[in-house]
Image: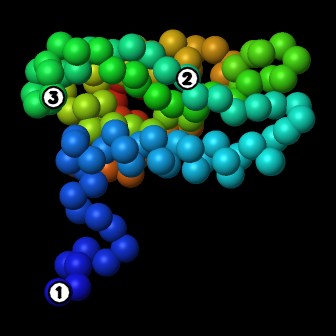
């Protein structure tokens, strides 16, 4: 039976599948962007430790690596651009969403470019609230 949602995977937003998808997409973006910006800049993964929300079934309270991409100047190591792929937990009310908005606000008060990619249908659009 053909998918009732041609061109999209409606199950992708499940938290169990999202981590793998996020990593694959960020790797693909890194591979696509790098040839366009070298030698003056480079793209790296930025990882931060975050505590999993209570509703994730793995092991609540366990830390995991939150990932996004940063474009940096080769000579100065200055971060030029942050590329953030929204996750389900960043669109749902709670600690993860609050932390995300705090971090985004910090970035937007600097000269750093900020790219927010939202491929999720669920949750409240992050761009519509908590703007600096």
What's the residue at 23%, 20% (across, down)? 52
**Which structural element holds mark 3?**
loop
- Can residue 101 be seen here? The reply is no
List the residue tagged with mark 3. Answer: 58
Q: Nearer the viewer, mark 3 or mark 1?
A: 3
CA gap between label 3 and label 1 equals 32 Å
Q: Nearer the viewer, mark 2 or mark 3?
A: 3
Q: Which mark is residue 123?
A: none
Label 1 Cα crowd, 10 Å radius (few <14 / some 14-19 / many 20+):
few
Locate residue 17, reporting x and y percent. Answer: 27, 47
What's the residue at 40%, 22% (across, down)? 65
Locate residue 90, reporting x and y percent. Answer: 30, 30
In the image shown, does 83 or 114 lie closer to the viewer?
83
What colour scheme governs how the chains and residues are painted in the rendered image of this protein? Answer: rainbow
Q: Which mark is residue 1?
A: 1
**Which structural element holds mark 2?**
strand
Query: For the N terminus, which image quadrant?
Result: bottom left
Label 2 Cα crowd, 10 Å radius (few <14 / some 14-19 / many 20+):
some
- Can residue 40 be seen here? The reply is yes
Q: In this rendering, is residue 16 above or below 6?
A: above
> Residue 55 sits in which quadrant?
top left
Q: How many marks?
A: 3
Q: Earlier in the sequence, mark 3 or mark 1?
A: 1
What's the residue at 65%, 29% (across, down)? 44
Locate residue 21, reporting x and y percent. Answer: 39, 48
Label 3 Cα crowd, 10 Å radius (few <14 / some 14-19 / many 20+):
few
List the residue tagged with mark 2. Answer: 46
């Amino acid at each position: 039976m053909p998918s009732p949602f041609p061109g999209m995977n409606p199950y992708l937003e499940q938290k169990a599948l999202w981590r793998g998808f996020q990593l694959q997409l960020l790797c693909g973006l890194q591979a696509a962007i790098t040839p366009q910006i070298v030698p003056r800049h480079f793209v790296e993964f930025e990882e931060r430790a975050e505590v999993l929300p209570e509703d994730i079934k793995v092991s609540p309270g366990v830390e995991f690596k939150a990932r996004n991409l940063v474009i940096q100047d080769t000579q100065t190591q200055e971060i030029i651009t942050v590329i953030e792929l929204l996750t389900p937990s960043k669109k749902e009310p709670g600690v993860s969403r609050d932390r995300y908005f705090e971090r985004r606000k910090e970035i937007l008060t600097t000269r750093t470019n900020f790219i927010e990619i939202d491929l999720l249908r669920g949750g409240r659009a992050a761009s519509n609230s908590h703007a600096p």
